[in-house]
């Protein structure tokens, strides 16, 4: 604990300042201090991006560029928690019928936050020139 922090807590304990004032002082103190790790951190990603370039034999060149806001993913996870259990069961059954073994009840906002925190380090680049297909999946 820093000396400044200790002083603020002592002023709060002795009644010289109230809890709101202590909170503001601690917040200002934290805002003014930037550690080297905070400076070197990358900004949080705002979009999940999927880019596909292909050259189909019959249809010619195909270009797909999908940019999904991370906030939309967060909202979707929150909405999934509102789905009734009976509907979750039916949805899971339909997903399995279509080859996707996934349990919607396992989606939690805190799990998504962890994934999003690590997205800035993820880039998947699939380049298979024989078929003329290039796929990129990344966060920006």
Image (cartoon, helix red, strand yellow):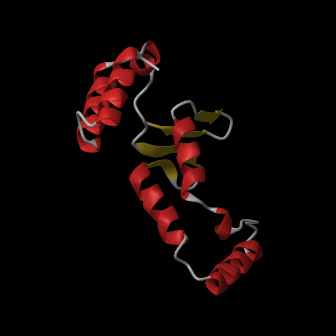
Residue 132 location in percent, x, y? 61, 39
Count the marks: how many? 0
- Residue in the picture at 34% in, 26% down: 30
Q: Is residue 69 visible?
A: no
Residues 132 and 7: in front is: 7
Quadrant of the image occupied by residue 75: bottom left
Instruction: Answer left or right for 1 relative to 89.
Output: left
Q: Nearer the viewer, residue 65 or 60?
A: 65
Q: Quadrant of residue 115?
A: top right
* Relative horizontal placement of residue 44, taking residue 92 as reference (left or right): left
Vertical position of residue 126 compared to residue 84: above or below: above
Compared to 65, does 28 lie above or below? above
Q: Nearer the viewer, residue 129 or 138?
A: 138
Vertical position of residue 49 compared to residue 121: above or below? below
Most extreme residue toward the top is: 36
5 shown above or below 135 = above
Residue in the picture at 37% in, 23% down? 5
- Quarter placement of the C terminus: top left
Q: Where residue 133 sits: x, y (%)?
A: 60, 41
């Amino acid at each position: 604990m820093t000396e400044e922090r200790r002083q603020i807590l002592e002023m709060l304990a002795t009644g010289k300042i109230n809890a709101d004032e202590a909170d503001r002082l601690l917040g200002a103190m934290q805002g003014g201090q930037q550690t080297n790790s905070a400076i070197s951190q990358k900004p949080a990603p705002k979009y999940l991006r999927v880019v596909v370039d292909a050259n189909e034999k019959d249809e010619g060149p195909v270009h797909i560029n999908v940019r999904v806001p991370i906030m939309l993913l967060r909202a979707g996870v929150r909405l999934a928690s509102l789905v009734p259990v009976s509907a979750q069961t039916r949805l899971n059954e339909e997903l399995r019928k279509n080859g996707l073994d996934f349990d919607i009840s396992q989606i939690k906002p805190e799990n998504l936050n962890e994934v999003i925190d690590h997205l800035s380090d993820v880039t998947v680049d699939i380049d298979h020139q024989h078929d003329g297909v290039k796929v990129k999946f990344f966060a920006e």
